[in-house]
Amino acid sequence: MINPADKEKMKVVEGSYAVAHSAKTCHPNVISAYPITPQTHIVENLAQFIADGEIPNCEYLNVESEFSAISSLIGAAAVGARTYSATTSQGLLLMHEALFNASGMRFPIIMTVTNRAVSAPINIWNDHQDAIAQRDTGWIQLYVEDVQEASDTLPQIYKIAEDHEIMLPGMVCMDGFILSHVYEPVILLEQNLVDNFLPPFHPENVLDPEDPKTFGAFATPDTYEEFRYMQEQAMQKALPKIEAVAKEFEEVFGRFHGGLVDRYMIEDAEIVIMGMGSVLGTVKDVVDQYRAKGEKIGVLKVRSFRPFPKEQIIESLQNAHAIVVLDKNISIGTNEGALFTETKSCLYNSKVRIPLVGYTLGHGGRDIRIESIVKVIEGTKAAAKYGIMVESQFLDLKEELL
């Protein structure tokens, strides 16, 4: 939410520029870059900032692959550098092995992931399959709704990830093209405010010949499980930190995009629509139309997918009559999207006993239109009326495929 008084500060810029500008204000020491559509404009803008001397004490690394991009940042983080990169789709998949390393060694590396469909078939448009495929790598994942949030979330995730009780890497996930290439009014982050909000990075453990340490060493069965336990504990500690940092950001900058979740007209909502990313803008427009007709529909935006905010979701849904979950991904073999599966899981042992409907949609950048959201809501009304749970299903498949 933007303070009306701040609207005069807005500039019309490309989403990728706003993200690059935000990364600049966070004072990274090392940036790794490998081009892949649709994230390339982010690292191109950062290259220009460095060439113009706008990011002091920063090393810009042109690498030969996305695997090299993440590997170089792991090395940089080991010696105490604040690091940044951006990637998408197949590039993120190429990083997969090293993503586990970054988390296991507790390096708070930060990336912007401009979400894009994965091959095959080749597709360069948006869905969430790439980041969802990395959900078990031990990275914090925050999904954003618009360009302003994509920009504002970067200093927040640095502050979360670099907390000494957390020390985990993090992704800011923004919808490719829909957000990365759109031009819209944005309040660019003011450097002095970011400096007051985000302290310099001073990790407790670094590689130093004067104080030798070992990272990522061989672990036998009698110690390995403890490392996984500590990672999970760090994720749980990140839950309240995400909330607290979002509120602190609001105090400093006057903007709030939600903490773990964000609620829109759900206090009295009989049907609640859940989702992540830019689709929520369309959903809110449709909900406004239903509200104008007196129908009680609300929206629950899930901002943090990892760690997953179970308690906040249960609390938000306890008064609803039915829930519908929208997923721009699918776990092949389950016929379910990841958010639907996670929501079912967290409601299973709760007091919330209401119909739950799931849809996977928007795959490969297929448009999610107002008519689609209306179809979702009307279908959920039927589930609420008869008190049934409907498993996740594809929406808007072509007739010849049905």
Image (spheres, helix red, strand yellow):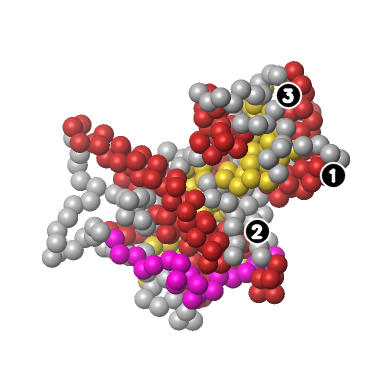
Query: How far is mark 3 from mark 1, CA to CA?
Result: 21 Å
**Label 3: which secondary element:** helix
The residue pinned by badge 3 equals 384
184 to 374, vertically: above or below: below
Residue 189 forms part of the magenta stretch: yes
The residue pinned by badge 2 equals 1
Quarter of the image for residue 1 reads: bottom right
Nearer to us in this view, 47 or 310: 310
* Nearest to N terminus: mark 3 or mark 1: 1
Q: Which residues are magenta?
A: 183-203
Query: Tag 3: residue type?
Result: Ala
Q: Position of residue 200 (x, y in %)?
A: 36, 68
The residue pinned by badge 1 equals 292
Which residue is pictured at 48% across the width and 70% down the height? Answer: 194
**Label 2: which secondary element:** loop
Query: Tag 1: residue type?
Result: Ala
Query: Tag 2: residue type?
Result: Met
- Please tell me how crowded label 1 is: few (under 14), some (14-19), or many (20+) other residues with Cα within 10 Å: few
Which residue is pictured at 81% across the width and 37% down the height? Answer: 295
* Nearest to N terminus: mark 2 or mark 1: 2
